[in-house]
Amino acid sequence: METVIPKTSVVLSSLLRADFTTQWRNRRAVVLTLIVPGIILMSWKSLIATVGGPFVLSNAITIGLFASGLMGYSNTVARDRDKGIFQRLRVAPIPSWAIMGSRLLVQLTMIVLITTIVFIVGKNYDNITLSPSGYIITYFTAIIGGSVSLSLGQMIVGYIKNPETVNSTTRLVYIAFMMTGIFGEMYMALSKDKVDEIIAYAVQYCPYGTVKTILSIGMEPAKWNSNTTAALLLTLGYSVLFAFLGIKWFKWNTK
Amino acid sequence: MADNNILTVQGLNVNYGDFQAVKDVSFDVRKGEIFGLLGPNGAGKTSTLSAIEGLLKPQSGTIMVDGYNAQEKPLHARASLGVQLQSTSFQAELYVIEVLQLYAGVYGLSLSKNDILAILRNINLQDQAQKRFGELSGGQQQRVSLVIATIHNPRLVLLDEPTTGLDPQSRRQLWERIEAIREKGHAILLTTHSMEEAESVCDRIAIIDHGKIIEIDTPQALIDKHRNEPEVIAVSRRGRITLEDVFIALTGKEIRE
């Protein structure tokens, strides 16, 4: 009797249903990832006239993307790997890419959701509106920016096996990005003095800075310039580098 | 491959860095038989199973599952296998019914909610359908794991220490279920530390130690072959020679970590 291999579409839809259900049951954690973007949107309201709406929105989205990709994705992968959930799936007739592909599709949805929530709060609380093209381009740049946070999360979970260590490392990296975003970007935006060039480069071209730049300029497409193109290329470069290392180092089990 | 074989392992070698966990292992499992792979801790049982399941890439050797080369056609081989891993866990957020729906889909089955509930009723777990896997007792978890391993009616079922941590009632029930699987014509390859269970349930066994298979035969044939050896008589404690006596004599008395 011929052995029948399940159709990839059937397998993928089953995985997606399970992964979306898991994400939905973890909605409290999802809400937590939206707290810092929410604080930015509310506490920076008085600064909008000085720094501009796109500056506030782009920082809120960037922080949200890193919270979701770093703390959400990598911690779930680390926990499931430690419990042997991946190994159980891998003994089924499933291509390995489908297991991770399903999880990444869920994260892609999260990126769109975070961006949408920031837009809604930004419009209703801060009266920030963008042009239609600004909204559309921001969704694309959010997906590109989200890929940096996801690939960085993948790199961390690839390099570190212990789920507790993954958790603490991702929190540290997240705090580092928050510091860069909230203090670095804010300092550069508000400082009347010339900011030290090295600090300015570090803030502008670190993963947080490049993601924030493409999001911010994406909201005002007319302002796109060579710096934005450089930031976009760097964002893609970071994604490729982190993803390459994350896949290279990743082991499906912790033993 | 002989037509009667559902699994043929030939010259299997598995390394972890410089450590060779499985050394030139060869055996076969025939259709409709329960085959036990016995060995002390660290003997190479789980590594052998992992290679068959496709979780480990062997250094060399051939694994044929239901006529498919597991290295060349891994998805075909895995579709013919039902697997219960040593420590199985499922997504903590999913209910039992959702875990079954997931694995039914993963094996390409379209089962309705009623079909899944019927499966759960069959293993007396219909009342646990809306519970999470982690909320079940050890015996209930084993039943769910076993039913998932066989949900797609596989020709070969691999069970890695299925009775570990179970109370006597759950063990007895599990063995009855394993024998029921065999009666449907499936072959079963299992590992266990319980020699009594292996002696009473397995049609044939292989004893593996330090990565090498040192004996393959029926339990009774192994006992008969070794019953008069001084090492076996020396370790015998019950007045009659058992499979455990033969096992201890062949693998040594020292405790393995």
Image (cartoon, grey):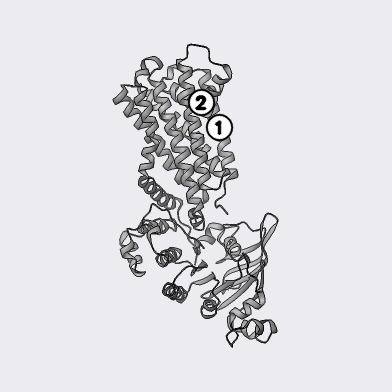
Q: Nearer the viewer, residue A51 or A148?
A: A51
- Mark 2 nearby-residue class (10 Å; few <14, some 14–19, many ≥20): many
Q: Nearer the viewer, residue A234 or A97?
A: A234
User: What amino acid is at disc 1?
Assistant: Tyr
User: What amino acid is at disc 2?
Assistant: Thr
Q: Between marks 1 and 2, how big is the CA–CA gap? A: 10 Å
Classify A31 as above or below B196. above
- Please say whether residue B30 is visible from this viewpoint: no
Which mark sits nearer the N-terminus, 1 or 2?
A: 2
Residue carrying label 2: A210
Quarter of the figure with the C terminus of chain B: bottom right
Residue carrying label 1: A238
Q: How many marks?
A: 2
Classify A220 as above or below B231. above
In the rendering, at what x and y percent does residue B224 appear? 63, 86
Label 2 SS = helix
Classify B124 as above or below B239. above
Q: Looking at the picture, do discs 1 and 2 lie on one chain?
A: yes
Q: Are marks 1 and 2 in contact (CB under 8 Å)?
A: yes
- Please say whether residue A66 is visible from this viewpoint: yes
Quarter of the figure with the N terminus of chain B: bottom right
Classify A58 as above or below A222. below
Q: Which chain is indicated by disc 2? A: A
